[in-house]
Image: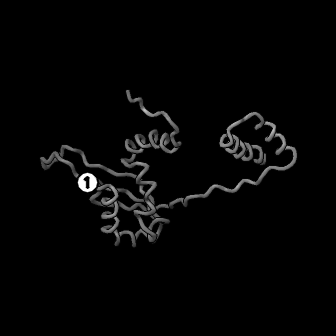
């Protein structure tokens, strides 16, 4: 009898499983689109744009058609770059639909607003003196080297913070 595999799961899998339903309900998008946005938008627009939401049309429309209809993607764009994005809408829609694998987006709505850059985690300075000895004392008895290293990084971040 085959039993389901119970093994190690990445935290991103767990987080995406929690976040995706919320994003889908609130904004109509998923973490895969957000995570791949730099490749979809290309070098020209990756640093100044961010997808915000997809508005899907209601199924029962006035014209009597009840089938699938593509949505409208709202994209936040910084300042004057919005004009250039307007001229490149066709290409961006084609890339987004290529990402989804079907014509998911028919139109892009551009909203001018600041787009926060992706911040990289700062390097934490190693502990020295009493704090380093204290942390090493806390790690005694932990056999797994991976767990030991993870707790060491966490402890360094916590103990190294200035109050």
At 29% from the left and 60% from the top, the residue drawn is: 107
Q: Quadrant of the N terminus?
A: top left
- Residue at disc 1, secondary structure: loop
Q: Which quarter of the figure has residue 85?
A: bottom left
Q: Is residue 63 left or right of residue 139?
A: left
Q: How many numbered markers are drawn?
A: 1
Q: Which one is in front, 4 or 74?
A: 4
Q: Is residue 2 left or right of residue 151?
A: left
Image x and y of residue 108, in percent: 33, 61
Image x and y of residue 33, in percent: 40, 54
Image x and y of residue 26, in percent: 40, 43
Which residue was labeled with disc 1?
70
At 21% from the left and 49% from the top, the residue drawn is: 68
At 84% from the left and 42% from the top, the residue drawn is: 133
Q: Which quarter of the figure has residue 123?
A: bottom right
At 35% from the left and 52% from the top, the residue drawn is: 54
Q: Residues within 10 Å of mark 1 (few under 14, many from 20)?
A: some
Q: Which quarter of the figure has residue 147?
A: top right
Residue occupying the far front of the picture: 1
Q: Is residue 61 above or below residue 116?
A: above
Image x and y of residue 100, in percent: 32, 55
Q: Which one is in front, 47 or 13?
A: 13
Q: Which one is in front, 60 or 11?
A: 11
Q: How was the colour assigned to the protein in this rendering? A: one colour
């Amino acid at each position: 009898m085959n039993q389901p595999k119970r093994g190690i799961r990445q935290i991103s899998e767990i987080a995406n499983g929690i976040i995706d339903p919320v994003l889908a309900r609130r904004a109509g998008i998923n973490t895969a689109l957000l995570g791949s946005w730099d490749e979809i938008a290309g070098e020209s627009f990756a640093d100044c744009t961010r997808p915000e939401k997809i508005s899907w049309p209601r199924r029962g429309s006035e014209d009597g058609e009840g089938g699938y209809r593509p949505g409208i993607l709202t994209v936040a764009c910084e300042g004057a770059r919005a004009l250039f994005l307007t001229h490149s809408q066709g290409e961006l829609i084609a890339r987004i639909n290529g990402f989804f694998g079907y014509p998911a987006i028919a139109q892009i709505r551009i909203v001018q607003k600041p787009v926060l850059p992706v911040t990289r985690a700062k390097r934490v300075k190693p502990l020295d003196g009493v704090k380093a000895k204290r942390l090493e004392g806390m790690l005694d008895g932990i056999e797994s080297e991976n767990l030991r290293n993870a707790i060491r990084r966490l402890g360094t971040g916590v103990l190294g913070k200035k109050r």
